[in-house]
Image (spheres, helix red, strand yellow):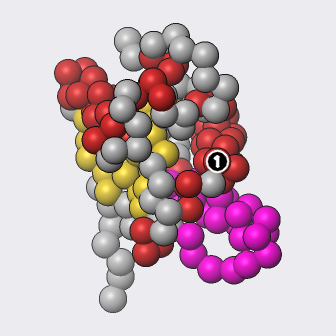
Amino acid sequence: MGGIRRYFEEGFVYFVTTATKERKQIFCDRKLCRILLVTVEYFKMIFDYQIYGFCIMPDHVHLIIKPTERFDLSFVMKMIKGSFARKVNKLRDQKGALWQARYYDEVIRDQKQLWRQVEYVHQNPVVAGIVTQPAEYAFSSFSQYHGILNSEGRILEIDSIN
């Protein structure tokens, strides 16, 4: 019996949410947030995808990503999640999965929907009660959109929305 195959629409932007295994709050550790951002930025250079927004929450991650036709979303997510898990397991001298096996994705079909998703991602830490204003949260793309100095969030450079 084969697994469920994902349908990939070339040229579209995707809103992706991926959660940690058993919703463990591993991203309360700032070092792990930085490792994830470096991992996403590294693969961005290799696979040439675009990132329009992100937010690392304690137990899940949001990405707004536009893969290329050569490397589809499933492949990109597999590489990001796998590489991150290997790095963290080596760092912690442990083994095992750090992520839930699957992730949620939604095709973004127009610029209005794209801006809604960017706003949703930036408001996520506020809605969760972690901060009172999006600018207070270090691990999202909010600072890049609003020209705020935030060295943590600038590890992963976002692409401009045309």
Report the front residue among 147 and 66: 147
Q: Is 110 on the left or on the right of 60, as rendered? A: left
Residue at the spot x=79%, y=65% of the render? Answer: 91
Residue at the spot x=28%, y=41% of the render? Answer: 127
Report the front residue among 106 and 31: 31
Compared with residue 82, is residue 130 higher up or lower down, i.e. above or below? above
Q: Which amino acid does label 1 sit on?
A: Arg
Range drawn in magenta: 77-98
Compared with residue 24, is residue 32 higher up or lower down, i.e. above or below? above
Return the residue at label 1. 30
Report the front residue among 129 and 26: 129
Q: Quadrant of the N terminus?
A: bottom left
- How far from the left and from the top, in percent, is residue 27? 55, 55
Q: Is 100 on the left or on the right of 39, as rendered? A: left
Asked if residue 19 lies in the magenta stretch, the reply is no
- How far from the left and from the top, in percent, is residue 160? 46, 16
Place residue 65 in its image quadrant: top left
Q: Is mark 1 on a helix, strand or loop?
A: helix
- How far from the left and from the top, in percent, is residue 8? 33, 50
